[in-house]
Amino acid sequence: MKKALSILIIPLAGILSLSAQDFKTVEITEAHKARAAELIGKMNLEQKLRVISGKYHPDSIDLNINVLACVPELGVQPIPMADGPCGINNKVRRTEPCTFYPCGISLAASFDRRSASLVGDALGLDARARGVGFFLGPGINLYRAPFAGRNFDYYGEDPYLSGEMAVSFIKAVQSHDVIATAKHFAVNNQEWDRFVVTHNVDERTLHEIYFEAFRKAVQEAKVGAVMTSCGRLNAVHCAESPYLLRQTLREDWGFEGTTMCDWQTIYSTLNGIRGGLDIEMPNPFTHDYERVKRLVENGVVREEEIDEKCQHVLQTAIAFGLLDRPLVRKPDEFDNPYCTANAYEAALGGPVLLKNEGVLPLAKGRKNTILLTGPYADRQIAGGGSSWCTPFEGRYVTTYQGMKALGKDYDVVLAEEPTDEQIKSAKTVIVEVGLGKRIEGENRDHEFGLPEEQEELIRRLTGLSERVIVIVHAGCEVDMNAWKDKAAGIVYAWYGGENTGIVLAQLLSGKVSFSGRLPFTMWGTFENNPASDSYYADKFIKYMNNDRFDLCPHIDFKEGVFMGYRGIEKFDRTPTYPFGYGLTYSTFEYSDISAKPAGDGFDVTFTIRNTGKVEAAEAAQIYVAPVEPSLPRPVRELKEFTKVKLGKGEARTVTVHLPRHAFEHFDVPSHSWVVDKGDYMIQVGDNEQHILLETLVTL
């Protein structure tokens, strides 16, 4: 255990400069396009279809690696893919070990772009070591409701926060000439019935809320690939949608990369071709040679339509050098100490301290016994599905292992089934609960509460001790009503990857201050959530499928742009813990705000001072509030954030830029972004409901 700790902590000095690193952006040039066109000119139809269809790796059934673009006779080598985003995994049952990173929601909770860069940078290296050309991440759908099985993969409820984390992650991955894949386009906000459900969303809401992170990924990060959602948007399968794939991605945003479907989600050969999708995964079914050949021979499909798809795939692959370097596995580079250190550093900023009634930091000494219990006190936990990874042997550190590694100053006792006497006699009781891969994962939604046996354990502990700290591992809000008022401390720890126990030990002991913030609103009950009356289908409509009628569940996004914290004032709701909330071991003072015109917007300057007794990091959040909007708008929306670490008594003046887009809204009649002339309040706070500074600007 001490060896594991040293492996993680010693290299940190070497990565602290990462925040200043300028990751290169991969651009598709005219030369790349010309080379791709020349290759396509040499191909017959069968070869072209190989370029735009996935298949399993031809060299090894055991690897179970999906590849594409296999035309070796023309120098186009197979390009391997790998799942993510918590680690590189591509083997049957995901048994090949890898560095295990914190999940997306944990990175978002850091409110620190550098956390996303750290993981993206490391995953790019991991992918190169394994000969991977396409990395199937990040997931950048939004958190709308707590039930969705893949909330932990994503970056929370806010489109700006999600977009900024995605841009940082993608740039870092692609700096290693590995194609990142922004997924799932679009509105993949639940796993329930995900292959047939249709999400019905109005145009303004799509652009302001659900498209924005994807737009930033395309226009700012120059993401190489976009994966479509499994289900329908406004009754059209996303993988067959010209609105998504042609109009929005390519015409409106200027996307020049390649697109692929999520696995087995094209249902028509013709619609798949005409809709604008490039790559069918995981194998050619609708893109089957005989099917497409008949359409071409009968004049239904022009071969130039297939050429267009090949052009997108090949020009992207060429831009990333995937046709010019050997895509081979290098096992001696799999376990990279640099990546291990990045995983630790990125995880440290994620956990959120929701409540602390004098129980943290933990007290030292033999008389201050710490009783550690719960199903995950000494056991690995993570979300399930394509994100699940197997860490290197002995690398995953549980909370008990992390606490014991602190040394003899902390008297830690592990009890799987603690007695009443143990509970009563302990100075502090820590119970570690959560959802984990059996409950939270791909292709399924889940209930709002923790498993009943965990609820029962917490109730028992809080009934016998007044100093109980509850650590929750989940990618979503869980029902805490039965015990949150009785618990003395509550920590939201997400899924922190292989360093979960080391990170929690550092934070619980006070060696490092908590600094995470909630990337979504905690409502207390689902009925309080603005999406509560339209998360599951309230109507089923018959549609024709393979010569039979099926029922298609329709989900109407009735809250519109007032999703998440944007709906607090609109629907007169009171959150239990607001978006952006989180405690530290210190206190901060904000002062001296000003805003000056600069470029296409305003430079906003303010000062933060650490008025507490310890070093800590503060996540300052900058919101824009229109004073007299021309149409219904949220009271305020996050438009910038910055993470500032300050020593005791230290102050720092911060300047951020708010561009024109920070004040815009989407205008449906013109199908474009516009700015209302008038007054806007620029507000700075430490969470969405706690505004500390504000200043007025006029456009």
Image (tube, helix red, strand yellow):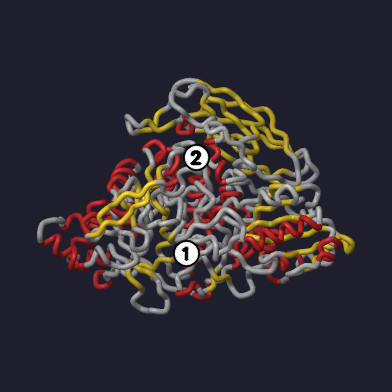
Residue 341: horizontal and vertical position, in percent? 62, 62
**As rendered, which of 14 and 62 lies closer to the eye?**
62
The residue to which callout 2 is attached is 563
Identify the disc placed on residue 386: 1
Q: Is residue 171 above or below residue 675?
A: below
The three-letter amino acid code for the residue at tag 2 is Met
Q: Mark 2 or 1 closer to N-term? A: 1
Q: Is residue 122 above or below residue 653?
A: below
Residue 675: horizontal and vertical position, in percent? 43, 27
Q: Residues within 10 Å of mark 1 (few under 14, many from 20)?
A: many
Q: Residue 183: which quarter of the image?
A: bottom left
What count of labels does the image hold? Answer: 2
Identify the disc placed on residue 638: none
Residue 125: tell me if it is visible: no
The three-letter amino acid code for the residue at tag 1 is Ser
Residue 356: horizontal and vertical position, in percent? 75, 48
SS label for mark 1 = helix
In the displayed structure image, the side of residue 643 where residue 657 appears, left or right: left
Residue most toward the right? 367
Residue 299: tell me if it is visible: yes
Q: Is residue 514 above or below residue 602?
A: below
Residue at image location 34% in from the left, 66% down from the top: 282
- Gap in angstroms between the C-alphas marked 2 and 1: 27 Å
